């Protein structure tokens, strides 16, 4: 058996460069490169390996390297890249030990919660324990093998520590299996002790052969499909809910065909918006706590919910108050049995596209009755009018953020991508955004991570270089994680940022006010010289700060100016930010959704007492499904 003499780090890069995925006959590189920030834990290990792979002609498979600025941000970039490529590709990320590694934990949790593949290589303490404790080591007096990297265990789908070279030949294939499995995917973490990274070993040449991971489309079991068909035919008011799985399986055409043939209305989650185009006769908008009243009204009366690739988060179910029909039942189509079993559903464990094809064929001749079709049309028309109203409020002197969203929705092309993640904006966007394609709406709301949007813009642009990529960023999110702007400039990535400045946390402020806590701690205000709280606005100049990172900034005050600025940003070949001040207090879209945020029953504040009474009334509608 022929061997190749390489370090563990060199072997890692060479192995990754030869991994491919294939689905529906389309084969592509799974991991085109790695983001990294180097420290003493990886600079002479993985850092050296990346350099050698780049310049040594013996390494014929390309493997790129990109410099990040914040470890969490690098993982967000990788997750956004994976999401925008329907989980068929991802990026690797490396960090040094200790604080650099721990910075990636939030990103790992985001990826795992969103069912997105990312491959992380946090450097680790010395396996030989000679320099013990090494710089940045957390010492556990009861277990010398524990390090900061053990914090990744609960937020990863795969975790391993490579303490000997031979272990790499087990660890990497197992990580790849998880990353390419639609039912199990999430963060895969391979901890790399810094001495082991540099250790040399004679590797079997076969370990580096091209490997294609075939992503199958799991067809539904015939008996499970028959049970689902019987339930649909018996239903009078069925409602389908499209989640992220409908998009990742590229099932949009089949979803439209299913809805057209049966007349069954289709609502969507944050991850599933765009799976069916908003102007389809069966599309009824976002469902749940931040959903459109059109979808929520139908969900409240539905006698059958057909979940398609959704994990039923508390926002989707309005904390289990959304489905009010006492006789409601569920059919769940999901590639993961864990999610298919939720809500006490009849399970169809299958690929969304394959299941929809089979369902549509098996339901030939079935269609909802005319009265229900008329009800769907009425709800769609009423919400369309409400959306138009929110998009064109004409508010002065400060516009509502819904007006900015309306302008963007009208200005962006079908294949352009809008990005958002946290705050009040995801709620408004799920209510109002009219997604025309599966790729246009990119929301991270499973972990709802403040700071996602800026690094995500780079990941999406890497996945879709031909598209205009627009990240909507609140001033709170900006202050969390702006440093990847430097990476964006360095990589000459043409992206557009829309910065909404309202000098506070609008989402939590509104939640605080509605739950009796009077927006406490949610506004950016100066403390008085005597220590008191004041209404003096914090003099942080985000536009100037953004310019300091090297991007162009256009400051506007009105929606008309915003439209002109967007045209200029599209025409530019540089990353551009459009900075606009919006009203902290809305208005926001009307919603009949509910979210379980407990309010204390013990308070001297009248506002809290009132909110608790409303909470006690709201929670009475909460149900459990078995």
Image (cartoon, rainbow, N blue to C red):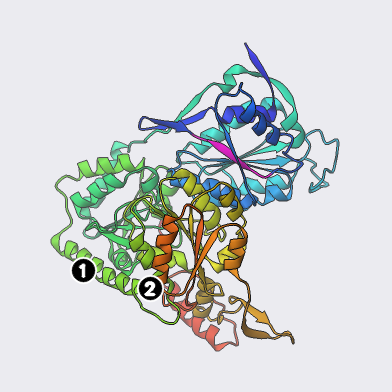
* Residue 589 numbered mark, or none: 2
Residue at screen point 57% across, 78% down: 600
* Residue 378 numbered mark, or none: 1
Quadrant for the C terminus, please: bottom left
Residue 492 lies in magenta, yes or no? no
Give the x, y percent position of residue 283: 27, 58
**Left or right of residue 293, residue 505 in this image:** right
Residue at screen point 72% across, 34% down: 45
Q: Which picture quadrant has residue 323?
A: bottom left
| Viewer-nearest of discs 1 and 2 | 2
- In terms of secondary structure, where does tag 2 sit? loop
- In terms of secondary structure, where does tag 1 sit? helix
Give the magenta-colored segment's residue range. 30-37
Give the x, y percent position of residue 611: 50, 81
Residue 325 visible within the image: yes
Give the x, y percent position of residue 319: 44, 65
Residue 33 lies in magenta, yes or no? yes
Pointer 1 or 2: first along the chain: 1
Task: Pick whichever, 476 or 252, lies toward us.
Answer: 476
Give the x, y percent position of residue 347: 36, 46
Q: Which picture quadrant has residue 7?
A: top right
């Amino acid at each position: 058996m022929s061997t190749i003499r390489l370090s563990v780090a060199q072997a890692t890069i060479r192995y990754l460069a030869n991994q491919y995925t294939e689905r529906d006959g389309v084969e592509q590189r799974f991991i085109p490169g790695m983001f990294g920030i180097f420290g003493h834990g990886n600079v002479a290990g993985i850092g050296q390996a990346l350099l050698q792979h780049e310049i040594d002609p013996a390494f014929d498979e390309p493997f790129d390297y990109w410099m990040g600025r914040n470890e969490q941000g690098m993982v967000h970039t990788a997750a956004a890249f994976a999401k925008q490529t329907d989980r068929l590709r991802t990026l690797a990320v490396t960090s040094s030990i200790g604080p650099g590694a721990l910075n990636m934990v939030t990103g790992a949790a985001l990826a795992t919660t969103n069912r997105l593949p990312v491959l992380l290589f946090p450097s680790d303490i010395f396996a030989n324990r000679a320099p013990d404790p090494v710089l940045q080591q957390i010492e556990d007096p009861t277990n010398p093998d524990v390090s900061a990297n053990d914090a990744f265990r609960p937020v990863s789908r795969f975790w391993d520590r490579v303490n000997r070279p031979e272990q790499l030949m087990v660890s990497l294939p197992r990580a790849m299996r998880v990353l390419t499995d639609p039912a199990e995917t999430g963060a895969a973490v391979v901890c790399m002790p810094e001495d082991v990274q540099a250790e040399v070993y004679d590797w079997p040449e076969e370990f580096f052969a091209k490997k294609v991971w075939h992503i199958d489309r799991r067809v539904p079991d015939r008996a499970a499909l028959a049970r689902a068909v019987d339930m649909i035919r018996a239903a009078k008011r069925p409602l389908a809910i499209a989640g992220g799985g409908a998009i990742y399986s590229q099932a949009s055409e089949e979803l439209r065909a299913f809805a057209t043939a049966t007349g069954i209305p289709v609502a969507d989650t944050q991850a599933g918006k765009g799976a069916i185009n908003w102007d389809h006769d069966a599309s009824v908008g976002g469902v749940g706590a931040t959903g459109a009243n059109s979808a929520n009204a139908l969900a409240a009366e539905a006698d059958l919910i057909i979940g398609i690739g959704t994990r039923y988060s508390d926002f989707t179910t309005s904390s289990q108050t959304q489905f009010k029909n006492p006789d409601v039942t569920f059919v769940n189509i999901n590639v993961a049995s864990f999610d298919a079993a939720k809500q006490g559903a009849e399970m169809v464990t299958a690929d969304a596209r394959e299941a929809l094809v089979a369902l549509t064929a098996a339901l030939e001749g079935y269609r909802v009755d005319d009265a229900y079709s008329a009800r769907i049309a009425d709800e769609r028309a009423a919400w369309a009018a409400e959306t138009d109203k929110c998009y064109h409020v004409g508010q002065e002197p400060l516009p509502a953020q819904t007006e900015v969203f309306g302008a963007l929705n009208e200005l962006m092309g079908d294949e352009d991508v809008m990005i958002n993640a946290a705050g009040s904006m995801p709620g408004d966007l799920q209510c109002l955004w009219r997604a025309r394609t599966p790729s246009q709406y990119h929301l991270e709301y499973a972990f709802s991570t403040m700071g996602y949007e800026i690094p995500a813009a780079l990941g999406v642009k890497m996945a879709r270089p031909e598209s205009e990529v627009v990240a909507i960023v609140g001033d709170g999110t900006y202050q969390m994680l702006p440093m990847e702007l430097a990476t964006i400039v360095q990589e000459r990535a043409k992206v557009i940022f829309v910065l909404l400045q309202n000098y506070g946390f609008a989402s939590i402020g509104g939640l605080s006010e509605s739950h009796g806590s009077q927006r406490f701690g949610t506004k950016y205000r100066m403390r008085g010289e005597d220590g008191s709280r004041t209404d003096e606005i914090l003099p942080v100049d985000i536009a100037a700060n953004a310019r300091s990172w090297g991007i162009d900034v256009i400051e506007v005050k009105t929606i008309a100016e915003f439209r002109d600025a967007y045209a200029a940003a599209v025409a530019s070949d540089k990353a551009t930010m459009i900075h606009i001040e919006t009203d902290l207090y809305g208005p926001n879209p009307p919603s009949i959704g509910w979210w379980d945020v407990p309010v204390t029953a013990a308070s001297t504040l009248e506002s809290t007492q009132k909110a608790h009474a409303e909470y006690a009334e709201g929670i009475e509608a909460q149900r459990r499904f078995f």
